[in-house]
Image (spheres, grey):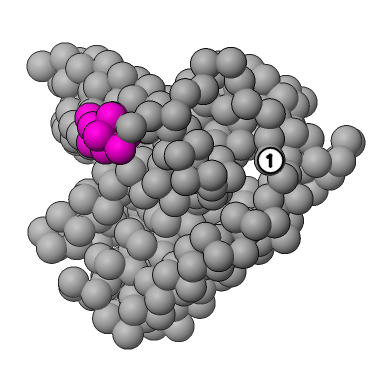
Amino acid sequence: MEFLYIISGLVFLIVGGNWLLKAAVGLSLRLNIPKIVIGMTVVSFATSAPELIISIKSALDGFPDLALGNVVGSNIANLALVLGITITLSKIDVQKSFYKTDWPVMMIASGLLFYFLYNDSMIDFKEGAIMFSFLIIFLVYLLRFQKKAAVIDEMPEDDEELSWVKTIFFFAIGGVGLWSGSELLIKGAVDLATDFGVSERIIGVTVVSIGTSIPELAASIIAVLKKEKAISLGNLIGSNVFNILAVLGITSMITPIQLNDVELLNYDIFWMLGISFLVFPLVFFPRKLRLDWKDGFILLILYGIFVFTTIQ
């Protein structure tokens, strides 16, 4: 039964990712918004929905380490696993907005999370409100300033401007598909992991985080195959920002998140900070503003090391 849940979940995720991408491209055309902005808002919010649902439920049910481990592990998986696989399949030319706004905001959000946890091993309502407010400020900045400054990228042949009805319909179907697929996959994966007596933290940073990163992987691979690379990179960075500022921000405003397993603070979060920082030099070396298969290979090796050392 667990394997049936996992397979069904993957099918829903891939189909949902395809519909969501179609809606995102159609919306960017209709509103004349750069695709990098759409990727960091609409797509990122939908693909971060599983993390939000799981984190809120975990915190309310008395499993805060699962909520934290889910976000920290997902952020590691998004950049090391998902980005690694994506750029192994096809190189990505990175826009200047990466180092001007996107990457700095991701690092600030990561730093905020580390500071709040290091301070008292807890994220309370006030700290959650600060994180969520920062997200709102970031989104307002994206929509007001980056929209005008972003370079218009080349449009692939299969792009089409959708009606509002079709855009909303495709977005709804895609979001439901991603959410349903993640629910099925997580249920199957957690049941399998629990059978082996794995701890709450390890389940969070490995099994659950990989499962909730599947939407990002599906959306990013589909984006690359359809040559929507701006959405692919923006989606991953935006998802990490959303995971911290929206998922943990909203969850902690509903109920305080108390850290129990110190390994999350002493080990896992440093991997998250390290991988997040590493993306910056990879974008500039050896070739400026480009990620290719060599960078992907480095990221995948690092993710393998993280998973191996975590489960030991």
In the image, what residue occupies the spot 75% across and 50% down?
96
Res 293 visible? yes
- Asked if the magenta segment contains residue 166, the reply would be yes
Q: 169 or 103: nearer the eye?
A: 169
In the image, what residue occupies the spot 27% across and 71% down?
252
What residue range appears in magenta?
Answer: 164-175
Residue 102, image quadrant: bottom right
Percent across and percent down for residue 207 are 33, 35
Q: 190 or 164: nearer the eye?
A: 164
Q: Is residue 252 left or right of residue 241?
A: left
Residue 264, image quadrant: bottom left
In the image, what residue occupies the spot 44% across and 29% down?
161
Percent across and percent down for residue 244 are 42, 61
Res 178 visible? no
Q: 263 or 147: nearer the eye?
A: 147
Residue at mark 1: 152
Secondary structure mainly formed by the magenta segment:
helix
Look at the numbered disc 1 and give the secondary structure of its residue.
Answer: loop
Q: Is residue 208 left or right of residue 233?
A: left
What amino acid type is highlighted by mark number 1? Ile
Percent across and percent down for residue 90 are 67, 20
Vertical order, 199 against 86 (above or below): below
How many C-alpha atoms fall within 10 Å of the one at disc 1: few (<14), some, or many (≥20)?
few
Percent across and percent down for residue 47 are 36, 41
Q: Quadrant of the C terminus?
A: top left
- Asked if the magenta segment contains residue 148, the reply would be no
